[in-house]
Image (spheres, rainbow, N blue to C red):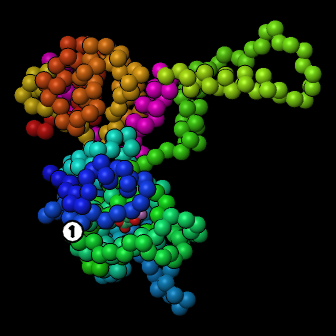
């Protein structure tokens, strides 16, 4: 259990003045911080095919040092030197319930904005080099000390230090600090930064994503095509005589925009697109399907005795435009579970752990019980014991 402590300002102040605007160091944001995973277990995860991981280090040569990156899965780390390298493992919250606990203190930002918890194990002098991220990140320092430099937003030349490493030119620091266990460095997108480990250390990066309009439009186009929507043809009965044949005139232009706008004005369509698109996971989930599937009666009985836990990294959301029909979006799929399931659907999406009492309204709905049984049997939600 991690509790975020802000000594110098309130959360409201943070959101108003720092979030998406400027980097800040939160000293002892986590008091008495204990790493939720050991370096050995992290190294073990990076040996798994289904886990995204990288080793980053510098290789010395006659012409100086060059950056190197290897992608996992790894078979061993015997070839690594004592110093100067980092192991970076993506989405560890999907694989370790203890690491997933690190997401909870950041519940003041909605889950659809969350990306993942990336962990870096670094030997002394290890780091990934100076770079810019497109993400907001809370870098939580675990065991060991690390020096962080952060520069200002602006024109920074980026270049490939290695095919897998986009770096930036040297920058002037606006923050230059040594992070100790429990300290947090928040960095919004666009600020160059560079962390160098002063000793063997662990860093836990809770990252938040934002999609570009280009990403969203391309996803919306896929949704419209998949669902065979928006197929009504441009139509212009009774149009006046056109004067300049080569011109798309103002009235036609307005008509074209209106045709496109009608897609965006359809709240149900956009809700279904956004819910499906944003609930898709980027990294694989650790889904443990039950060896002996439960039937609906078993599920209801077990739920009376113990709560259901959502598997780490599973994304499930509701949107006001459609939740009235009990619609939720789970791992990219839309499920309509009936108007009476509305309160239960909200509970399922809002809380990582849900009890029989919280789901009671939905449990009277056969669609809801059927969907929940499928999800539990597939491992999306699980009973701890
Ligand atoms: C790291 O932890 O090594 C890199 C984190 C970051 O710069 O985003
Ligand atoms: Co970064």
Using the image as rendered, state which of residue 274 and residue 58 is in the foreground. 274
333 or 374, which is in the foreground? 333
Quadrant of picture, ligand 2: bottom left
Q: Is residue 322 left or right of residue 243?
A: left
The residue where tag 1 is placed is 181
Q: Please tell me which residue is depicted at 58% across the width and 20% down the height of the picture.
A: 229
Is residue 72 something one can see in this rendering?
Answer: no
**Quadrant where the image shows the C terminus:** top left
x, y percent for residue 366: 25, 13
Instruction: Please rate how many residues cluster around mark 1, counting C-alpha atoms within 10 Å: few if below 14, some from 14 to 19, many from 20.
Output: many
Q: Is mark 1 within 8 Å of ligand 1?
A: no
Task: Tell me which segment is drawn in magenta.
Answer: 268-297
In this view, the residue farthest toward the bottom is 62
Residue drawn where x is 35% and y is 80% of the image: 125
Along the viewing direction, whichever of 362 and 86 lies nearer the viewer: 362
Indicate left or right for 251 with 182 as reference.
right
Q: Is residue 144 magenta?
A: no
The x, y position of residue 51, in whole percent, is: 35, 54
**Quadrant in the picture for residue 139:** bottom left
Residue 205 rendering spot, x and y as whole percentages: 33, 59
Q: Is residue 62 visible?
A: yes
């Amino acid at each position: 259990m991690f509790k975020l402590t802000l000594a110098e300002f309130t959360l409201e102040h943070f959101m108003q003045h720092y979030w998406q605007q400027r980097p800040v160091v939160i000293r002892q944001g986590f008091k008495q911080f204990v790493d939720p995973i050991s370096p050995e277990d992290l190294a073990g995860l990076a040996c798994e095919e289904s886990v995204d991981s990288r080793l980053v280090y510098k290789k010395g040569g006659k012409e100086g040092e060059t950056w190197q990156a290897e992608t996992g899965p790894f078979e061993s780390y015997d070839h690594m030197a004592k110093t100067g390298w980092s192991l970076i493992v993506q989405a560890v919250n999907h694989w370790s319930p203890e690491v997933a606990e690190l997401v909870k203190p950041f519940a003041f930002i909605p889950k659809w904005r969350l990306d993942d918890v990336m962990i870096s194990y670094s030997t002394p002098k290890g780091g990934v080099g100076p770079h810019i991220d497109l993400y907001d990140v809370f870098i939580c320092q675990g065991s060991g000390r690390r020096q962080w430099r952060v520069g200002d937003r602006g024109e920074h030349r980026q270049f490939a230090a290695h095919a897998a490493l986009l770096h930036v030119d040297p920058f002037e620091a606006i923050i230059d600090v040594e992070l100790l266990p429990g300290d947090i460095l928040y960095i919004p997108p666009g600020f160059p930064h560079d962390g160098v480990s002063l000793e063997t250390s662990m860093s836990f990066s809770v990252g938040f994503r934002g999609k570009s309009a280009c990403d969203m439009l391309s996803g919306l186009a896929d949704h419209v095509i998949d669902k065979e929507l928006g197929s009504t043809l441009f139509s212009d009965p009774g149009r006046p005589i056109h004067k300049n044949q080569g011109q798309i005139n103002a009235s036609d232009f307005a008509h074209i925009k209106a045709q496109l706008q009608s897609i965006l004005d359809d709240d149900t369509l956009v809700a279904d697109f956004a819910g499906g698109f944003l609930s898709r996971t980027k990294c694989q989930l650790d889904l443990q399907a039950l060896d002996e599937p439960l039937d609906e009666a078993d599920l209801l009985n077990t739920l009376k005795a113990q709560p259901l836990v959502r598997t780490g990294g599973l994304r499930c959301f509701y949107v006001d435009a459609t939740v009235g029909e009990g619609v939720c979006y789970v791992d990219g799929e839309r499920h309509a579970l009936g108007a009476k399931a509305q309160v239960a659907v909200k509970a399922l999406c809002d809380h990582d752990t849900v009890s029989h009492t919280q789901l009671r309204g939905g449990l009277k709905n056969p669609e809801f019980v059927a969907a929940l049984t499928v999800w539990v049997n597939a491992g999306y939600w699980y009973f701890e014991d």
